[in-house]
């Protein structure tokens, strides 16, 4: 079983920086150190995409969603998103 966290921002001013800030806040409060490594991914704009690394291991992706993906889903606003493989299962309530 894998546990993942994801977030997306959408709007005229949605950028890599906005979603990166959300990722940084999550990692800060969880005590995780995440690093970014430039990469290519078909869902994201080239040059605005990075692989997420936790503890030196691949743990997800972050970027600005490509116009083609937005068009395919009939989304009219720019979007930026991340998906992160969590290093441990979340606590249960």
Image (cartoon, grey):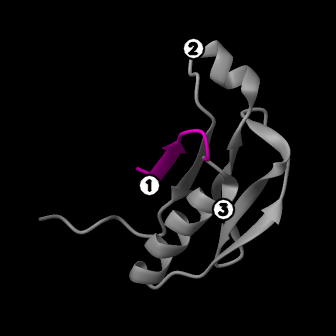
Badge 1 is on which residue?
A: 5
Category of crowding for the residue at label 2, using alpha-carbon neighbours closer than 10 angstroms: few (below 14), some (14–19), many (at least 20)? few
Q: Please check the rendered image and state whether residue 29 is part of the magenta-colored stretch, yes or no.
A: no
Q: In the rendered structure, find residue 17 and report the number of the disc placed on it.
A: 3
Give the percent coordinates (x, y) of residue 19.
57, 57
Please indicate whether residue 86 sits to the left or right of residue 90 in the image.
right
Residue for point 47% across, 82% down? 28
Q: In the rendered structure, find residue 74 and report the number of the disc placed on it.
A: 2
Residue closest to the eye, 43 or 85: 43
Among the 4 quarters of the image, the one containing residue 43: top right
SS class, disc 2: loop
Please indicate whether residue 44 sits to the left or right of residue 6 in the image.
right
SS class, disc 1: strand
Category of crowding for the residue at label 1, using alpha-carbon neighbours closer than 10 angstroms: few (below 14), some (14–19), many (at least 20)? few
Q: Which one is in front in this view, the residue at disc 2 or the one at disc 1? A: 2
Category of crowding for the residue at label 3, using alpha-carbon neighbours closer than 10 angstroms: few (below 14), some (14–19), many (at least 20)? few
Residue for point 74% across, 32% down? 66
Give the percent coordinates (x, y) of residue 80.
62, 45
Is the residue 71 above or below the residue 48 in the image?
A: above
- How far apart in space, not on screen, are marks 3 and 2 (Cα)? 24 Å
Give the percent coordinates (x, y) of residue 65.
68, 37
Please indicate whether residue 10 sits to the left or right of residue 50 in the image.
left
Please indicate whether residue 9 sits to the left or right of residue 49 in the image.
left
Give the percent coordinates (x, y) of residue 25.
47, 74
Closer to the chain start, of discs 1 and 3, is 1
Residue closest to the eye, 87 or 31: 31
Is the residue 83 above or below the residue 37 in the image?
A: above
Task: State which region is magenta.
Answer: 1-13
């Amino acid at each position: 079983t894998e546990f993942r966290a994801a977030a997306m921002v959408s709007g005229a001013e949605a950028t890599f920086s906005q979603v990166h800030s959300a990722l940084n806040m999550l990692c800060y409060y969880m005590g995780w150190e995440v690093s970014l490594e430039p990469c290519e991914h078909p869902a994201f704009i080239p040059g605005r995409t990075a692989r997420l690394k936790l503890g030196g291991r691949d743990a997800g992706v972050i970027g600005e969603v490509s116009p083609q993906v937005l068009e395919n889903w009939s989304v009219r606003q720019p979007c930026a998103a991340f998906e992160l493989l969590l290093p441990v299962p979340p606590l249960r309530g």
